[in-house]
Image: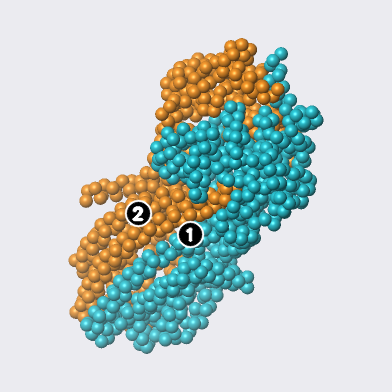
Amino acid sequence: MKSQIKAICSVLSFSLRFAAENDRLYIPLKILGIIPDVIFGILTVSIPRYIIDSVGINKDIKAALLFAGALVLTMLLQTLLTGLLGNAISLRDMRLNRKLSEELQRAAARMPYAEFESRQTLDDYGMVREFISEITVSSVLDTVFSAFSNLLKLFSYLYILLEYSWIFMIVLIASTIVRAVCQNREEIGLFKLQEKTAPLNRRIGYVSRSVMDYSNAKEVRVFRLHDFIAEKFDRYMKKMYSLELSSIRKLSPLRVIAAFTQALFLSATYGLIGLSLYNGDITVGTFIQYTGAVIALAAALSGFLSAVVALKNQNQYVSCYLDFVGKYDRESGSGGESEAKRRIPMTIELQNLSFRYPESETYVLKNINLTFHLGEKIAIVGKNGAGKTTLIKLLLGLYTPTEGRILLDGKDISEILKDEYSAVFSAAFQDSELFRYSVRENISFDRPFDEERAEEILRALKIWERLERCEDGLETYVTRALNENGSDFSGGERKRILIARALYREAGIYIFDEPTAELSPRGEQLIYDSIFNLPSVQTVFFISHRLASCKRCSRIVVFDSGAAVGDGTHDELMAQGGLYAEMFSAQAEAYREEDE
Amino acid sequence: MKNLFASFGDSFKKALYLFRIQLSFGWEGVFTQFLYIFMLTVKKIIPVLLPKFIIDACTGKQLSAFVIVLISFSAFSWIVDSTIGITEWVQTVYNLKFAHYFKRRISAKAMTMDYKDLEDSEALDGLERAMDAAYYGLSDTLFSELFLHILLLIFLFFTVSTLNFPVALVTLAVVLLLYFINRKATEVNHDFEMQKSPLRRQREYAENCMLDFGTAKDIRANDAQNMFLSKFADASEAEIEVRKKQNRYNLGIGTLKTVLNALMIFGMYAYLIRSYSDGLVAISSFTVYLAALYEFYGAVEGLFGCLLSFRESAVNLAEIDGILGRTETITKDGKPTEESVRSIEFKNVTFTYPGQSEPAIRGLNLFIDAKDSTILVGENGAGKTTLIKLLLRLYDVDSGAILVNGTDIRELSYPEYIAHFAPVFQEVWLFAYSVKENIAFSDAADADKMREALDFAGIAEYIGKLPDGIDTFCTKNFDENGVNFSGGEQQKLTIARAVWRCADVVIMDEPNSALDALSESRLSENMRALAESKLLLLISHRLSMSRFCNHIVVLDNGEIIEEGTHTELMNKNGRYAEMYNMQSLQYK
């Protein structure tokens, strides 16, 4: 009970504070919206009494017409006022929802990248996203104010009825207690059901998404996966139906009990009021008013109870959201929004660097000690799963070292402001994708665009002519998803724009993590040429499986099972005869054998 | 006017269709629904009638009648409320069934739709809209709600007409007028929704970019958060602007409707009061009329809402039908394929991607013998992958033909035909299911055969070391112990998938792009062995792969420029020799 009250309070305080902080007029407007609702509620219940009594007892037609006019006017005013306020509030609702989403987006941007790979975070994160997209803060506020307004109505109808007799109080309290207990039991049952259906829902969602996501369309067609997928869908659905039905079977007696209480409450009150009418204590008009008030009271009570239950349920989302946003509030210590200046570090040093995923026992990287210097062109090579990409993610600050540290010009990177640190790097990854915005925005994002510089890079990458041919030039949108005049770029073209993005960014260190795997050797060579020829690119890391390209680098670091097992130039490593030499000859052999 | 009924007639037919679908889930669902709606109506009528009985009993001093009324009322309301409580609940299950029925059918369609349509943004949009329509746009309570509102209106109309029939007719006229206003408002609102929908799409795209895992790396590495935030804000504001106009319009319409309604009700009240004072109505009946009139507007609005959802459902169903009714060029119909593929022939094939002006393949002729192992080489964009897509009938040729064992593949039954092929595509795709399911697409898989396939791809040892072995989930989506496989590992799993299929023709499109040098050389050894028994069709940028292929095809700009064995082409000293020398030089 205590925890439930606490839950409701926390939803109340969160939503009201959020509304007050972001929109000073929101709460006053909402309250303004409640008042006519309550007043007109009382009026619609009460006015008929006066109409009836005017005609029935006083035989005063004029008065009756006046009251009838008042009733109609009440109705008219209520509709107009509610409409007017509703309009104003609906816009503010949209803004509040937007604000909340922005707050989450900012928090998500500050979330350490590695957290994306933790199961727990993903679960919470899923809930938070559901909160902002499905539940929304505006509907939480709606529930809050519906609870208030129903409570006010409850009291106002009660007030009307108390004029008649205090016995109502007792009847009402008794029936409320029974109904609240029923509703609470039901909620507990539904919560259990939800715990069981949530994973099913996730799976069903995945199945339908994976069908609509056409990146797997080739597999679906060629491997004839229709039945494989449909079977999964049907299986989860069947499970879901039976779970739902069994919980309905278990919980429906509660509803019968609640209905019974409700019926008792209604007939008791009708009986009491009717008895007074029978005894001639009240007029017909009053009878109508009281019975109307009873019905309205019952509705207000149901409305209040279900709003409270809804608030209680929303708490899990709200608290999840607050935890999430609170966790990534200012933790990264980003001092200001100011654009950090380009910085070219002289050295970057890895000291006893080790890394494992938080939930895993095995180290992906173990005790790495390396120092890189300005102007080096470094190739990171190794077998699949040797830890190359992890190293890059550590360098970029996407992961935090489990042990050891990374020093930038001698300073531990954990002490450097995040904005300042990330301004040091520019990176392109194998799975990078273009955004559905213009080519220009894909290259420079919202920063001032230096067209000359972009042209130089795009020309070097041999993609300039293709863009020039487009009607909108650099303003051409990628795909037609957000712009009708967008263009579909081929895989090779996309890669080159992505590399242009990385090269355009003024950074001290450039990182290319297998961005050229699908390109032809000629295409790859072109990209390496343009990277090597750009004077602004001084220090650069490459990851590539094509060792012929690595050969051009001034330094090659070889990784095997999380350790650096070789470090030197191509010639040095070949002379040492380690893993690198083995790999290089494996690739070279293919060409040699044929020459026999 | 005729048009009006015609459009409603169509909506009605569509609603009947939906109703039949519901019936197919069993009569219980429909029964529950009608019961629910019926009880709701009763619940609305009780407070209108009940006071009359009580007043009659009480003012007439009939205590026994009063007690009977009370007892029957409490029994009645118990039954009504319990029934509502339970049927409301049971309905949610049928609701789910109904929504899933269309979701499933659209999903099934999305899987069989011509592949080329998936690159057509119009078809994709249509698919998305159909899915949205199935989620939010179809009502499964059309008839029961219509039933409710008609029932309620008949009751109210009947009540009012006992007072005076012409008065009831006047109300009907007002109702009709309100109907036309509502109709117009619906159209205008639809336009507003159309204005909002691209804005919503923009807003959601920016939001998803900020929140999704897939884009997180790039946004972080580029410090691009602000751009997405401002795109999000801009789209939201634009959406709010439209909403503002929409609100203003709806307020105007709402006022008009309320005023009309208020006038009507006031007139009725006045008439009622006059009738009472003329002694035409008893006080108890007076209360009934008063309450009935007050309910009138709500009932009329309810009916309009219901008619509107008929139309909405019809529009949304049309959206769904548009997708479900798409014809497919690739079907089950056709001749059976022979037991084994002996040859593949491209005859004068030309193909242009939809929406492109330049053909990707230009009058290409190519004969592939099952005994040979063939490799396609050439620059990016030369048409290598396109040839594979054509062969797999992901696209059909514009002109010319592809023949398998001499038969045009378009004449063959697709499921049978495609069973002869086992492809590895360039883009790796794994489902968030177990390794086993990703390879065999079935839960029951022979462990030895699985090991063989994994071994071929060079990943058996790695998978064997995982605690869950081949039952390990890909990604942590559905399993805490799931593994996020690296790019190279994923590629190996897709190779295992192709090997597992035991098809005549094995196609590998850049199967080694993410593999390290040692895995690559091991894979090519395995492929050499595989080529002994299968038709191997390979695409690779690494010409080292060509060493065990005796049929090398060099493509450029959609055409074959050279063809032959390695020795032949080296002697020819053309493009292949140039490419090969360039590459091998790098390894000297």
Q: Looking at the image, is A404 positioned above or below residue A54? A: above
**Colour that chain B carries in the picture:** orange
Residue B405 shows up from this direction: no
Q: Residues within 10 Å of mark 2 (few under 14, many from 20)?
A: some
Report the residue at 66% width, 34% height from top: A544
Position of residue A492 measured from the top left corner of the image (x, y, whole percent): 54, 33
Chain hosting mark 2: B
Q: Which of these two is toward me, B430 or A537? A: A537
x and y percentages locating residue A271 in the rendered image: 42, 80
Q: Residue furthest front?
A: A535
SS of the residue under disc 2: helix
Q: Which disc is residue A98 wearing?
A: 1
The single residue placed furthest to the right in the displayed view is: A576
What's under tag 2, amino acid-wise? Phe
Residue at left offset 74%, top offset 33% = A569
Left or right position of A425 against B33: right
Q: Nearer the viewer, residue A231 or B261?
A: B261
Taking B482 as reference, is A94 above or below it?
below
- Estimate the x, y position of residue A189 in percent, counting from the top left: 59, 62
Check if mark 2's residue and mark 1's residue have beta carbons within 8 Å. no
Residue A115 visible somewhere in the drawing:
yes
Residue bearing mark 2 = B192
Residue B239 x, y percent position in the rendering: 41, 56
Please give the name of the residue rendered at 36% of the width and 86% of the height, measured from the top-left corner: A282
